[in-house]
């Protein structure tokens, strides 16, 4: 009788045993596959936590005559490891005129002094996103009319509502911003919004007039680039905040950025900001270790159990082995038969395990918060005495945590599974194969 | 022969098989026990991680509901200030780990001999150059400048209520004037009035980390002072320094919670404090960092929990499979036992006893060894896992459910053989 026939007959006749083996291998393969997909999902989740802790560095190029040029910025943004989130900022002072070139009136009440040449001037703030400026996030500024400025804004300004009222300006009007040094040099801008301060200015009485809240004007980066560097077409900026994916890489990225040519880095100040990450770092590592240990224990113990189970299974067939050998079938052929039996069952189990594992992964996936696209911010039931911080639907560019079986994982489980079956069967068969048929049959109970 | 003897004899004679089943039971039990310990550890770690996000809420006096007065420097709110008593009551709510509130003023500092201390970059006007932007602290650890990482302590201690007359200054100023932790300096609010001059002991020095020249910091009064010209002083001293001024008090206080998930509940608890007139105060929750990471943190938690649940279920299936396989191979034996007149329950009981005999050794051994397993894996891969602890509760859980499972598995796997008569069993044997 040929080998294949024996294999098929055995598997068919011993339905119960074959089923047990199939169930066992299926369960193990599913566990392994799910384990692998969970491992890669936790890695994504961990990377997301690191990213969401928002480590970044700031380049202060205020002292450079040229600021950060568009070309340098492009090179910086090409650095590997940046998350793609960044903010550009510039600050200046400007004279304020109406559309006809008449000076506008600034607030003087509460000013410690009014510096010369700043009689009609105030502080100019430009930010990729005006609402993320510290005046808004810390100083309590709020937009009352119109829209905040973004990196797309051109020739736009936001005015303090009291300043606008005092000068009879409203949203949609045009005004001029003029250089302090060269009085004739102006740039026209459109008022796209008004803001007000919800907190009192604590520096009233000690601040120069141009820093009074009423005299501050927010504008876009191009306009301030014209005022500072005379280049509105090429947008140059004083400051850049660059967010990174992994705060652990901040040092590497900052060093790499400073290798960019065409800028005098000695005159720039680079500062790293990763306090949130540093606070969380230890706990985060602890959590990672736990995930690692969980996966390591599951893998190692599964391997052990598989080998033990195979041994247990083959021990029940000592008698059979003896008979085969007595019939003159070679040891190699007998071993091959056993291996084939296991491989056939294992192949079926591995195929089925894909479906089983995919089903489990789906179940887990639906429980993961990062995949729930609906508003995840809970609205807190608050009485009128409590304010919720506005939750800007901030795009952190986090990756979706996906629990799925990757092709490599599946291939790995196939390869590893088959090798394991081979090894455990060979290992279990070894003591039996060592014996002579006579010995085997005579020691039977 | 009695049933117990039969069970023991079988176990001993088939020692290789017994050993195999023992090893299997041991491995699976270790797996489940470690899994339970890991699930607990994961929960603790996630909680700890959440706690590092600096989540807090701010109690502000509500200037909208208070009156307004007129003084030399324009109008000011006459709304009541937060008192120490109020803050202590709020801080006593469960789940609040600390709080801070500050009174800001500009102090003139001098050394022990009354010689003015000069700022880092003096302007040349001696009465301006000795001015330091000063905060009183209930607990300087929770001061926003330290929390944000703008400043970092490099020597000495943080200030809290246990210091009556402590001050923290910058290392740069200390170096400039040859001062050290433990030295005494003097402070006065307004040297041209009858304000008191108080002696202060330097308890700590801070280093400036943030870039103060960055103009984004220039939105308030403090921005006119270099970080190095900041100082933090004890609450008691600050009150004494400012005793001539009426309009002084805590306009706001920040309360830090240990678990951001409890924030909402804690705020509700705080609002139930009846001795505070909540009409006069506003509570603002600051959990921005937590909101950003909370989803990813709970994702990790869900993933680990799934892994553990899956492992536990798989372990249960494995045990059933192994026992049914081992029982199935004893069909012939069952037939013989039944044929010699032993009752079916007695046969089943014998098998159950055999399995339990193995389990009685395997379970405690698994408990003892799984205590080592986590630590072993930790050291093996150079990772710490102090939190992974197998507790007696875990053991009790596994032992009870394990025993129930084992008995069920034996019973179920005996069903096919038990349905048949001994003759049928023996005649169908190969």
Image (cartoon, helix red, strand yellow):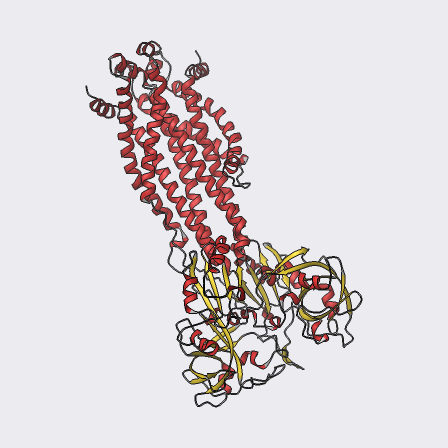
Q: Which of B98 and A171 lies nearest the eye of the viewer?
A: A171
- The correct choice, above or below, for A256 with respect to A389 in the image is above
Q: Which of B255 and A53 lies nearest the eye of the viewer?
A: A53
Can residue B160 be seen in this snapshot? no
Residue at image position (46%, 38%) is: B35
* Quadrant in the picture for the C terminus of chain A: top left
* Quadrant in the picture for the N terminus of chain A: top left
Q: Which of A405 and A61 lies nearest the eye of the viewer?
A: A61
Q: Which of A336 and B35 lies nearest the eye of the viewer?
A: A336
- The correct choice, above or below, for A308 with respect to A53 in the image is above
Q: Quadrant of residue B110?
A: bottom right
Q: Position of residue B274 (x, y in %)?
A: 62, 63
Q: Quadrant of residue A374?
A: bottom left
Query: How many badges with numbers are in the image?
Result: 0
Identity of the residue furthest to the right in this view: B113
Q: Position of residue A114 (x, y in %)?
A: 60, 84
Left or right, B314 with respect to B96, comes to left
Residue at image position (60%, 80%) is: A208
Q: Quadrant of residue A357?
A: top left
Q: Position of residue A113 (x, y in %)?
A: 62, 82
- The correct choice, above or below, for A289 with respect to B295 in the image is above
- The correct choice, above or below, for B322 with respect to A108 in the image is above
Q: Position of residue B7 (x, y in %)?
A: 43, 17
Can residue A414 be seen in this snapshot? yes
Left or right, A53 with respect to A9, comes to right
């Amino acid at each position: 009788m040929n080998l294949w026939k024996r294999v098929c007959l055995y598997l068919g006749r011993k339905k119960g045993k074959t089923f047990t083996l199939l169930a066992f291998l299926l369960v193990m393969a599913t566990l392994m596959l799910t384990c692998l997909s969970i491992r890669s999902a936790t890695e994504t989740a961990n990377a997301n936590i690191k990213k969401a802790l928002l480590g970044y560095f700031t380049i202060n190029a205020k002292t450079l005559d040229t600021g950060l040029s568009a070309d340098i910025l492009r090179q910086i943004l090409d650095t590997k490891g940046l998350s793609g989130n960044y903010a550009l900022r510039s600050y200046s002072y400007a004279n304020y005129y109406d559309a006809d070139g008449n000076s506008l009136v600034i607030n003087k009440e509460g000013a410690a002094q009014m510096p010369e040449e700043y009689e009609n001037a105030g502080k100019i703030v430009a930010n990729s996103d005006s609402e993320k400026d510290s005046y808004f996030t810390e100083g309590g500024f709020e937009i009352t009319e119109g829209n905040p400025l973004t990196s797309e804004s051109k020739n736009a300004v936001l005015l303090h509502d009291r300043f606008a009222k005092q000068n009879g300006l409203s949203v949609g009007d045009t005004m001029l911003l003029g250089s302090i040094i060269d009085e004739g040099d102006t740039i026209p801008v459109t008022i796209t919004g008004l803001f007000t301060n919800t907190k009192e200015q604590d520096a009233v009485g000690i601040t120069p007039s141009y820093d009074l809240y009423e005299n501050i004007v927010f504008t876009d980066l191009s306009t301030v680039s014209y005022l500072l560097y005379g280049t509105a077409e090429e947008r140059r900026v004083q400051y850049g905040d660059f967010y990174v994916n992994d705060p652990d890489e901040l040092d590497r990225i900052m060093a790499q950025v400073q290798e960019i040519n065409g800028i005098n880095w000695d005159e720039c100040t680079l500062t790293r900001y990763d306090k949130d990450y540093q606070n969380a770092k230890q706990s985060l590592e602890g959590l990672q270790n736990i995930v690692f240990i969980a996966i390591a224990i599951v893998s190692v113990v599964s391997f052990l159990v598989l080998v033990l189970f195979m041994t247990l299974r083959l021990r029940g067939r000592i008698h059979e082995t003896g008979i085969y050998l007595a019939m003159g079938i070679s040891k190699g052929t007998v071993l091959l038969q056993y291996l084939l039996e296991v491989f056939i069952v294992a192949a079926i189990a591995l195929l089925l395990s894909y479906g089983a594992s995919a089903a489990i992964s789906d179940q887990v996936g639906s429980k993961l918060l990062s995949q729930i696209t609906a508003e995840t911010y809970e609205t807190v039931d608050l009485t009128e005495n409590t304010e919720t911080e506005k939750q800007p639907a901030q795009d952190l560019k986090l990756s979706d945590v996906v629990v799925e079986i990757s092709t490599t994982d599946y291939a790995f489980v196939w390869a590893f599974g088959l090798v394991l079956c081979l090894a455990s069967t060979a290992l279990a068969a070894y003591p039996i194969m060592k014996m002579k048929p006579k010995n085997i049959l005579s020691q039977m109970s | 022969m009695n049933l117990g003897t039969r069970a023991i004899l079988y176990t001993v004679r088939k020692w290789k098989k017994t050993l195999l089943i023992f090893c299997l039971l041991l491995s699976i039990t270790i797996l489940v026990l470690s899994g339970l310990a890991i699930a607990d550890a994961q929960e603790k770690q996630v909680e700890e991680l959440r706690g590092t996000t600096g989540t807090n809420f701010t109690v502000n006096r509500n200037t909208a509901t208070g009156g307004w007065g007129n003084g030399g420097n324009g109008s000011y709110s006459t709304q009541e200030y937060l008192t120490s008593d109020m803050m202590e009551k709020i801080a006593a709510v469960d789940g609040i780990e600390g709080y801070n509130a500050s009174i800001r003023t500009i102090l003139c500092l001098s050394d022990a001999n009354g010689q003015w201390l000069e700022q880092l970059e003096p302007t040349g006007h001696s009465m301006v150059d000795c001015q330091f932007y000063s905060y009183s602290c209930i607990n300087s650890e929770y001061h926003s400048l330290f929390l944000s990482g703008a400043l970092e302590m490099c020597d000495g201690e943080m200030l809290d209520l246990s210091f009556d007359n402590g001050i923290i200054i910058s290392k740069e100023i200390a170096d400039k004037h040859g001062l050290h932790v433990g030295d005494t300096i003097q402070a006065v609010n307004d040297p041209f009035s009858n304000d008191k001059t108080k002696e202060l002991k330097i308890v700590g020095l801070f280093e400036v980390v943030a870039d103060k020249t960055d103009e984004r910091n220039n939105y308030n009064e403090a921005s006119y002072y270099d970080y190095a010209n900041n100082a933090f002083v004890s609450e008691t001293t600050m009150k004494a320094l400012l005793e001539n001024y009426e309009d002084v008090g805590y306009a706001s206080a920040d309360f830090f919670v240990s678990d951001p998930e409890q924030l909402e509940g804690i705020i509700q608890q705080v609002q139930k404090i009846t001795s505070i007139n909540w009409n006069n105060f506003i509570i603002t929750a600051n959990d921005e960092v937590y909101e950003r990471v909370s989803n990813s943190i709970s994702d990790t938690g869900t993933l680990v929990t799934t892994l553990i649940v899956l492992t536990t279920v798989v372990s249960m299936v494995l045990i059933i499979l192994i026992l049914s396989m081992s029982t199935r191979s004893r069909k012939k034996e069952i037939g013989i036992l039944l044929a010699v007149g032993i009752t079916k329950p007695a046969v089943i009981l014998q098998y159950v006893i055999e399995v339990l005999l193995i389990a009685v050794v395997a379970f405690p051994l698994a408990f003892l060894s799984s205590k080592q397993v986590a630590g072993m894996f930790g050291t093996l891969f150079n990772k710490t896992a102090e939190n992974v602890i197998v507790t007696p509760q875990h053991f009790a859980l596994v032992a009870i459910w394990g025993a129930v499972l084992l008995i069920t598995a034996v019973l179920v796997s005996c069903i096919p053989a038990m349905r048949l008569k001994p003759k049928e069993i023996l005649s169908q044997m190969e």
